[in-house]
Image (cartoon, helix red, strand yellow):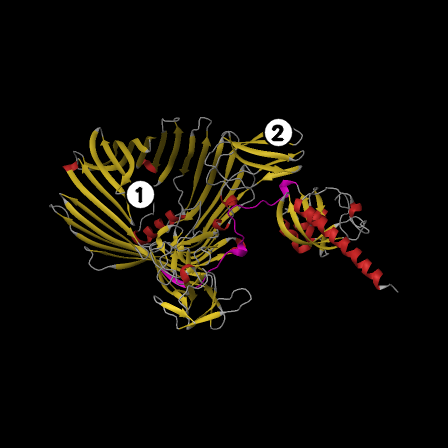
Amino acid sequence: MAMPGSILMKNRSLFRKSLLVHSVSLALCSFGASGETFNSSLLVGNSADMDWSNSKLVMTPGAYDLDVYVNNAWRGKFDMTIANDGKGTVLVLKDDVPLLGIRDLDDLVANKSDGQIDISTLLHGGKSTLAPGELRLDLEVPQAFVVTEKQNWVAPQKWDQGINGVFTNYNLNYYNFYGLREGYTNSDNIYLSLNSGLNMSGWHLLDNSTWMRYSNMGKGYWINTTRYLEKPIVGIEALMRVGRTYTTSDYFDTIRFRGLTLNKSRQMLPDSERVYMPVISGIATSSAVVSVYQDGHIIHQITVPAGPFAIRDLMPTGSRGDLSVEVKNSGGTIERFAVPFSSIPDMLRPGTSDYQFNVGEVDMRGINDHSQFAQFSYSRGMNNYVTATAGSIWSADYFSFLLGGALSVPYAGSLSASLEQAQYRLPGDNRRRGEKYALSWSKSFPTQTNLTLASYYYRTQDYASFNDYVLAKSNIQDYGGTGTSTINSKQAFSANLNQPLGDGFGRLSLTAYWRDYWRGQKTSRQYNLTWSNAYNSVNYAVSLRRSEVTQSYYNYETDYEGDVVTSLRTRGKTENNLYFSVNVPMSLFGSPGSVASHATVQQGKYASSDISMSGSAQDVDYSLMLAHDSEGNSRSADLYTNWKNSVTSLNSGLTLSREYRQASLGASGNILAWRGGVITSPNNGRNFVILEAPGVENAVVNGDTSTRTNRNGIALIASATPYRLNNFHLEQDGSKSSDVDLQGNLLNIAPYEGSITYLKYKTDTRKVYTFDVLDSEGNQLPFGALVSDSHHQELGYVAQGSQIFVKSDAQPEAIRINTSKGKIKKSCVITQPTEHAVNICR
């Protein structure tokens, strides 16, 4: 049996050992030194169970909470187990593997029946390093297998579906025209547009309607454009609509219909997947720095371990030049290669896809045909160079099929091409078939010349889009005939060329467009050449525009025998216009503004000119313009104003000339009803966020003076960005005196598209009471003395000048002041304290 003394000595020895072990551990954690060594003989007792050099088994078997880093990026704290197998195998829970952010592990994890997995099997040939002093596990994985952090990305689990509510976006305008000379007709017109919605349990019922009244028509009338039920479906990254809406497709004509549409919602995707950029891949022979250059400027740099790497998160810079990649290995060797880059709207990132699906019946205004149809299109980025596309439309007597693709060709730019074949049968006609061929090209040249888009299409004579088919079928049903279009487009070409001319010399741009029709019925050509430049913030431009229109028509004449003779003739019209413009920024009435002027020369002769002044004063935007037109020697003066407050946006316009007088008034904004009442906003939109800061009136949201909290402390944001983190900063501008304090003025949220979300700020709404206090002998109370209520709840302290500031929901009936000094306990009480008077504490 051990004696008490020996037990005491043993406990002291264990205490010293434990204290020293923890001290060394804390020191190692503080310096984060992995692999450092020290003299383990300094430890009291047996230290053979740990190797502090981190060179082999460094922790005894068991469960640990470890900080896990993948290529030096922290992934979080994980429950890990050190196996008792003599090798120190590190095991991770099977359910935690996806949280490591390592790619291509689904099959491996699915085939594991155990609840834990050897971490070394997940590293794609990489390695792991355990630092026991820091409870840290470093995983080194070839960069190509690492899921990179997505910028501006919010995980779907954090998106907010919103609350229930009803809203309407309104736009009301009144126009009055009064002629001062013969030939002008007086008119009074009213236009009201309402985009309304009901949000309930994540579903959105939306309606877009318009009411119009024209003086020459007498009474007004309503027109409904769309009315549908909408639901974002996060699981498939899609947006579903059911009801009266428009088809959505990047490849087929838009048509109004009644039915269902299901589209890939690209707003739900990370920024890096919404726009095209190539994936840069390679193999590093050792730890290396990979740098990406465009036009000689570095746009991305990353350090990668040995093994394959893939950079998937590049974002466009605005340049269209090819990418140069430099891989600098730690041994000093440098590898360089080029990755072609040229973007066109049809291009998708490798591995991403897009689709649109529409099914229902035609519901075009003024058309008696209600053909049922289904429409589908799908695109996928196959690799850095190829995006493939397919689509089709099915209807009873109409069928079309489209195949296409986009190519990024090294040194040649981006090219997209498609072929669509349509087969259809019109009433009383044989079956027809036609094709449409489309081609687009985009290229950036080393001279910084940008051919942003050159597109061409050719349609055979019997080709008809589904929209053309429905119109022709309706015309046959209403008016008879063959349904042959009177004007059938044959081919069209458009191009846009931009060329910077160097510092100080501006920029040159050229746009061209021409279109031909079958049977030579019509030909149109348009060209526009613009030179623009700036000097000391003064912007000026000169444009030359030419348009050519050739129209064929049938001429009917009577010959000398009295017979009617028909002949096809052609007439054409050519216009050449020259435009000058200059804009000078300056301060007007103490606020930023500008003065601008324009002039037009038509067919070599002066045609028109104007000079205008625009700017802002407080919350009012204004514009004043004086104009002259050579036709009729007309002169006019225009005044336009817009005032935006926290309730609505009001605008007015007035035009005066010798020939007529025109006036307009308008209002626009948003009205929303929710569980907290009715709130308004001067802005249109339907991605709502309701901000509530109880008691905080007139606070400015995100620096926008037109968005403020109302008297109930509520503000309405109408245009939040869906599926992205929106930050809202409240700032009390001091214009309203208030005792309310904001306890944190920054909140954020990631709303669903079309949702009504709600954020509430913490505020202290208690009122501040100020009391002047003296003791019973007329002396000031000690500074800093504690003040409490009759229930001994702290209310504050005595301030300088023997003043007491109390924050409370109601004025306290009595306050107690602790005037103790040292060991002498003293206090006094004020009963029924009164503001703006001297209170005696007794």
Q: Mark 1: which secondary structure?
A: loop
Evaluate whether residue 810 shows in this view: no
Which quarter of the figure has residue 142? top right
| Side of 671 relative to 262 (left or right) | left
Foreground residue among 361 and 534: 534
Q: Which residues are magenta?
A: 142-167
Q: Main secondary structure of the magenta part?
A: loop
Front in this rendered view, residue 828 or 639: 828
**Could you tell which of marks 2 and 1 lies nearer the N-terminus?**
2
Q: Which residue is mark 2?
A: 335
Q: Is residue 404 magenta?
A: no
At 46% across and 31% down in the image, what residue appears? 444
Image disc number at residue 486:
1
- Which amino acid lies under the numbered mark 1 shown in the image of this protein? Thr
Q: Is residue 514 above or below residue 645?
A: above
**Residue 636 in the image, given as x and y percentages of width and height:** 17, 41
Residue visible at 38% across and 35% down? Answer: 494
Q: Is residue 150 magenta?
A: yes
Give the Cα distance between marks 2 and 1: 62 Å
Answer left or right for 87 relative to 207.
right
Comparing 256 with 842, the one in front is 842
| Mark 1 closeness class: few <14, some 14–19, many ≥20 residues within 10 Å | few
